[in-house]
Amino acid sequence: MLKKSLFTIVIVALFATMGTLNAQEKYAVIIGGNMNPDVQYIPLAQQWNEGDDPGQYGFDEFWNDTYLMWEMLVFDKEFTDANVHVLFGDGEDFTFPGQDERYTAGYHQGFFSVTDANSYEQTISNTFSDLANTITADDFLFVWVISHGGTNAFGSYFYSYDNQKVYDDELASWLGNIAAHKKVVFLSFPKSGGFIPE
């Protein structure tokens, strides 16, 4: 009887240890894309990607929403900062004179930057490729995109910061290469519903 109990305890301990070794990791990709470069009525000096007049047309909203998503994941949802990949603009946090400190990395002690890399199409592709070599089936992936988007004869798309159209089938392919069984994708741009079939 004692041997049976000891054996049971060893088996339970083994399974508990295996569960700890294979514990779920949480990963995120946050992409701050671009305004619609096809819209000609917005003067270049007032376009968000020029950064000259962030108060016009709400272009600072791209940064504020990107920042708040990063903050929520790292400080409220227990993602590690190293696992949250923030792709934004040219690869630097968005700042402008008179900016509310609330939307700067320094708002949180010990943080100097939120942005990890630019949000060019190639960088986005490389990030998903790197994650495909890192993420396991037991891990969780959250993807959030804020940008301008649309639909044409080739499908639905959003703009990367270098004004490339990232199509629904591209994103589907990148996500399909990632082993995680649990993935959540949140798309915040016009015509994003066109991504659903993919």
Image (cartoon, rainbow, N blue to C red):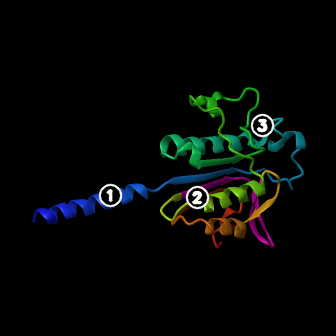
Q: Is residue 73 above or below residue 182?
A: above
CA distance separating discs 1 and 2: 23 Å
The earlier-in-sequence mark between 1 and 3 is 1
Which residue: 61% across, 56% down?
143
CA distance separating discs 2 and 3: 37 Å
Say whether residue 12 is left or right of residue 94.
left
Which residue: 42% across, 56% down?
21
Residue 110: image x %, image y %? 58, 30
Q: Can residue 189 be seen in the rendering of this structure?
A: no
The earlier-in-sequence mark between 2 and 3 is 3
Question: In the picture, which quadrant includes the C terminus?
Answer: bottom right
Q: Amino acid at mark 3?
A: Pro
Question: In the picture, which quadrant includes the N terminus?
Answer: bottom left
Say whether residue 165 is left or right of residue 85.
right
CA distance separating discs 1 and 3: 52 Å
Residue 27: image x %, image y %? 56, 53
Q: Which residue is mark 1?
A: 16
- Residue 152 or residue 6, whichever sits in front: 6
Q: Is residue 47 above or below residue 155?
A: above
User: Magenta stretch?
Assistant: 141-160
Q: Amino acid at mark 1?
A: Ala
Specify the quadrant of the image occupied by residue 107: top right
Q: Which residue is mark 3?
A: 54
The stretch drawn in magenta includes residue 2: no
Q: Amino acid at mark 2?
A: Thr
Q: Which residue is mark 2?
A: 134
